[in-house]
Image (tube, rainbow, N blue to C red):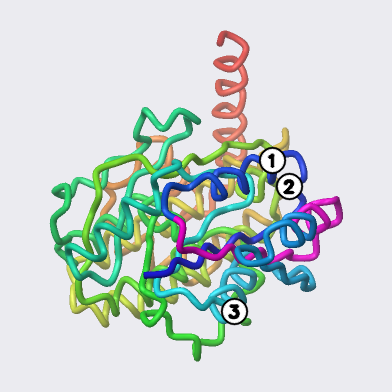
Amino acid sequence: MRVSIIVPVYNVEQYIDECINSLLNQTFENYEIIFVDDGSRDNSGSICDVYCEKYPNICKVFHKENQGVLSARDFGVKKANGDIIVFLDSDDCLRKDALEKICCTFEKKKCDMVLFEFSNNENYNKKEINFDFINNEEVEKKHLYKQMLLISSSNAVCLKATKRSLFNTAIDYSKFYFVKHGEDLLQSLQIVTDAKKIVYIDEVLYYYRQRENSTVHSFDPNRHKSIKAVHQELEKYIDLWEVPEYHPLHYAREVRGWVDTLFLYYDGKADSEILRELAEDEYFRNAYEKMDSKELSKKNLIAAKLLYERKYKLLEFYIGVIDALRKIKMKIK
């Protein structure tokens, strides 16, 4: 069994050595590392070149124009030769026995996908989420679908080791290359749906580094457009899964994402044009009317109601109060 580790690379020269060394020190030896340099503007691509020269039998690097992480991962899958695909972000790391644990599970359980836990701690000693599955047992697909709707982290492709044969490389993701929020969900939808058997390992195998300047935390004025595109695709899969009772959960997640756009990017004055664009969008209005409101926090529910009712001045005041309270809490800490 051979593993292909796909590492999308973009402007991470400060962290990429640690990432690569976590792979070169694996206890499992039959693997290849595929670096996809997504148009880095720093020395990240050159660092990958050095490792490929030093380890030509293990490392490959491909330099391409910047099109985002979804494009880079898709590109890497098409270049992979291994039986198993593992994704690793270039500022993160794998536990030294991660590949051994993963491959052992594939061999023993004869499964199509292996799920595992992650930590924000480099010592791998604290789970950030709990998949709520039974260790070393098959995952009930309907349960996983529900978690994908409720817990964003459960959609991370980096927490899924997957048979390469499961990837449908004929899918054209190019229309989603603009998406910067939810691209993991987009790619997870197909492979999770098509997997016949999924097994869960109740161990932290992945170290996720939190960075303030990462894509997740960077300003994106089109965040709501990314969310809408992803949720429209998710809606198709809910129908495919034949779980219509999950639609209210899906709509609540859509509304939550819409409202988070307001709170994340408030900078002292809400943009009235953006407020109106969000409020008038028919997809949002439909989601608000059909959502399971119990899935929203009180804070988000109030903001969503004000947005839906087009009470822009009151909404702007409310967002300002929430932002002020957030800053006070940060100073206290």
Q: Give the amino acid at mark 3.
A: Lys
Give me the residue at 54% from left, 68% from top: 281
Please provide the residue range marked out in magenta. 29-48
Q: Amino acid at mark 2?
A: Val
Query: Distance of mark 3 from mark 2, alpha carbons?
Result: 22 Å
Name the spot of residue 98 as percent of width and height, x first: 39, 48
Q: Which mark is residue 73?
A: none
Front residue (pair 266, 113)? 113
* Labels 3 and 2: the sequence-earlier one: 2
Q: CA distance from mark 1 to mark 2?
A: 6 Å
Mark 3 residue element: helix
Circle 2 — which element? loop
Q: Which residue type does callout 1 highlight? A: Tyr
Residue that extends furthest to the bottom in the rendered view of this protein: 170
Q: Where does label 1 land, which residue?
A: 15
Disc 3 to disc 1: CB gap under 8 Å: no
**Local crowd size for mark 3, using a 10 Å CA cut-off: few (<14), some (14–19), many (≥20):** some
In the picture of the structure, the residue carrying the numbered disc 2 is: 12
Q: Residue at x 27, y 67 (%)?
A: 247
Check contact, mark 1 vs mark 2: CB within 8 A.
Answer: yes
Instruction: Based on the picture, tell me whether residue 18 belongs to the magenta stretch.
Output: no
Query: Mark 3 or mark 2, which is nearer to you?
Result: 3
Q: Residue at x 29, y 41 (%)?
A: 203
Viewed as shown, does residue 259 lie left or right of 222? left
Q: Secondary structure at mark 1?
A: loop
Residue 43 colored in magenta in the image = yes
Q: Which residue is mark 3?
A: 79
Q: CA distance from mark 3 to mark 1?
A: 24 Å
